[in-house]
Amino acid sequence: MLQLSIFLENAQGRLADALNTLADLQVNIRALSLADTKDYGVLRIIVENPEEVAEKLRERNCVVKITQVWVLKVPDSPGGLAGQLNKLVAEGVNVEYMYGFVEKENEQAQVVLRVRDAEIMQAAMDKLALK
Amino acid sequence: MTQDELLLHLRKTIEQVLKAPYYKKKLAEVGIYYPGDVKSLEDFRKIPLTDKEALRQNYPFGLFAEPLEKMVRIHASSGTTGKPTVVGYTREDIQLWAKIVANGLRRAGITSNDVVQVAYGYGLFTGGMGLHYGCEELGALVIPISGGNTQRQLMLMRDFGSTVLCCTPSYALYLADSLGEEGMTKEDLKLRVGIFGAEPWTEQMRAEIETRLGIRALDIYGLSETMGPGVSLECLKGEGLHIDENFYPEILDKDGNVLPEGETGELVLTSFNKMGFPGLRYRTKDITSITYGSCTCGHTGWTMKRVSARVDDMLIIRGVNVFPSQIEEAILSVGGIEPHYLIVVDREGNLDTLEVQIEVNAASFNDEIRELEELQQRLQTKIHEILNIAARVRLVEPKSIPRSEGKAKRVIDKRKEKQLS
Ligand SMILES: [Zn+2]
C-alpha cells in the first residue's frame, strides 16, 4: 500500500491548513499519524488514489513523498499485535515506524507498518500468509 | 621581487599618481610630496585607501594622471546609484593591458592556434575589449561577437570551430542549456577552455559548466578601476588566480591593517607602470586571500583565491567574519537541497545567534524523522566546520522564504533592527 508523507513546519495552524487542503481536494483520510519534532513534523496519511492526491498537493507547494507501507490486520485481543510482530521480527523484518487504526466497516484493528527492507517484508508476509 | 625592487616600483607609481589632483591632495595629507618621501613599506602603508566613492566625487576625470590629449580610450562602469566610474587609458596602457591579458591566457594554455569567442559585452564595460586585445596580442583568432544572441553564438561557435569561450559563467550555463534547442550537443563543438568572470560563481557552477560543455572552466578577475579583466587568471593547475606582476596586492582587515599571507580580507590593489589612470591602494571590496610563490605554469609572484564574497556582504557574528556565500557553500556541499535559505542573526542577552532556515524540497525530504534530523545535523556540522561558529539549522516548508524580484534577500539582521528601535 502507498502512504503519503507531507512535510509540515511546526508553526501554528500548519496542520489545520494541511487538513483543510485535503478537505478541499475531497480526500478521505483512512488512517493518519503525525510525527513531530520541535521545528517540524511529518504527516503520514493513507488515502484513496495516493498518486493523484500527491500531485495535487505538490501543485499547492507541499513537499510530499510517496512511501510503500504495509497494512496488517491485527487480532482484536490482548497480545494480538505483539504476536503478529514477533512473527515478522523472526523473519528479519526491521520496523521503522507504525501506527494503528480501526477499519470502521468490520471494526477490524489494523496497523500501518513502514519497514526498512520491503523485500524481506514481502517474503515474510507471503510465508506467514498474512495480509 | 625584492623589497628594494618593490619600493622602486611603488615610488614610480607615486610619481605618476602625483600628477592627478585627487592623489596630490590625498598624499599631502600624509606628508608625501615626492616619491622619495616613501622610504619603506611602512610609509607606503600610511597612504589612505581610495575607493569607488572617490571616483564618483571626482567625476569624470579627477583621477586621470595624464592630459586628455594623451588618452586614447575611456571605459566606465555603470554606477548602480548615480554617476558612473570613469577610467582612462593612454596608448601605452592599452598595450600593457593587452600584454597582461595575453600572459594570463598563455598560462591558461591558450595559444595562437586557438579560436576565441569573446562573448563579453563590448563597449564602456571593460570585459569585451579587454579580452579582445589580449587575444590579439597572443595571436589567437578572435570572434568579437559580444554578448547575447544565443542562437547566433552557438551557430558560429560550431561553424567557426571556437576552442575558447569568454563570457560570464551564468551565460556559459545558458549557452549549455540552449544547445539542445539548436539541435546540437557539446560534441558538435570544439570548445576546450572557458574564461569566465565578471560575476561571482561557485565550484558547483564550475563543475556543471565543465560537464555540460565538456571544457575546463577557468576564473578571470579584474575591475575597470585597476585595468579591467586580466588582473588575475587561473592557470591549468587550478591552484588559484595568478596576479599579474603589474599589480601589487595587499589584504586588509576591516580596520585597514595589512594581513599576512594566507589570511582572508579585502583585496587592495596598486598598479605598476600604468600611466593614464594609475591606481594607488584601491579598495576592490572583494574578499580573498593571497600567497606568494611560484607555480609550475611559470608564474612567479602573488596568487589569489577565488573571490568568495564582497565586503558589503560581511556579517560579524560573535566577532567572527561571516559571509552568506560561505553558508551557501555549506548547504551546497551537503547536497540534496536547493539553496533557498535565509540567514537570521539575532542577539539573545549578550550572545549573537545564527539561525539558517533552509527550505525542504522533494529531493531532501525524507519520510523518516530520523533522516531529516540527520540532514539537519549534517548541515549544522558543515556550517560549523566552515565558519567555526555554531548555527541552528531549521528546515522550513518550500516557498516559505520570501522571494524578491531582483537579488534574493539572504540575510535578516535583527540586531540592527533592535538598535534602531
Ligand atoms: Zn600556475
Image (cartoon, coloured by chain):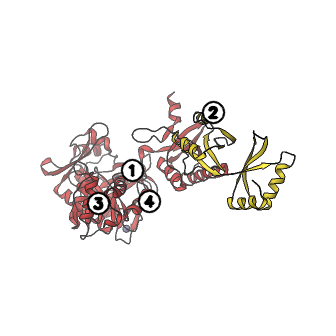
How crowded pointer 4 is (Cα within 10 Å; few <14, some 14-19, many 20+) is rated as some
Q: CA distance from mark 1 to mark 3?
A: 19 Å
Residue, disc 2:
A16
Give the percent coordinates (x, y) of residue B383.
Answer: 56, 51
Q: CA distance from mark 4 to mark 1?
A: 16 Å
User: Which amino acid type corresponds to the residue marked 4 in the rendered image?
Assistant: Glu
Left or right of B124 in this view: B411: right
- Name the foreground residue: A65 vs B152: A65
Subunit of mark 2?
A: A
How crowded pointer 1 is (Cα within 10 Å; few <14, some 14-19, many 20+) is rated as some
Q: Dot 2 lies on which element?
A: helix
How crowded pointer 3 is (Cα within 10 Å; few <14, some 14-19, many 20+) is rated as some
Give the label, 2 or 3, closer to the camera: 2
Subunit of mark 1?
A: B
> Of the numbered discs in the image, which one, if any, rests on residue B286?
1
Query: Where does ligand 1 appear, by image quarter?
Result: bottom left
User: Which amino acid type corresponds to the residue marked 3 in the rendered image?
Assistant: Asn
Residue, disc 4:
B261
Q: Is residue B384 visible?
A: yes
> Of the numbered discs in the image, which one, if any, rests on residue B246?
3
Q: Are marks 2 and 3 in contact (CB under 8 Å)?
A: no
Upstream in sequence: badge 3 or badge 4: 3
Q: CA distance from mark 3 to mark 4?
A: 19 Å
For the N terminus of chain B, the image quarter is bottom left
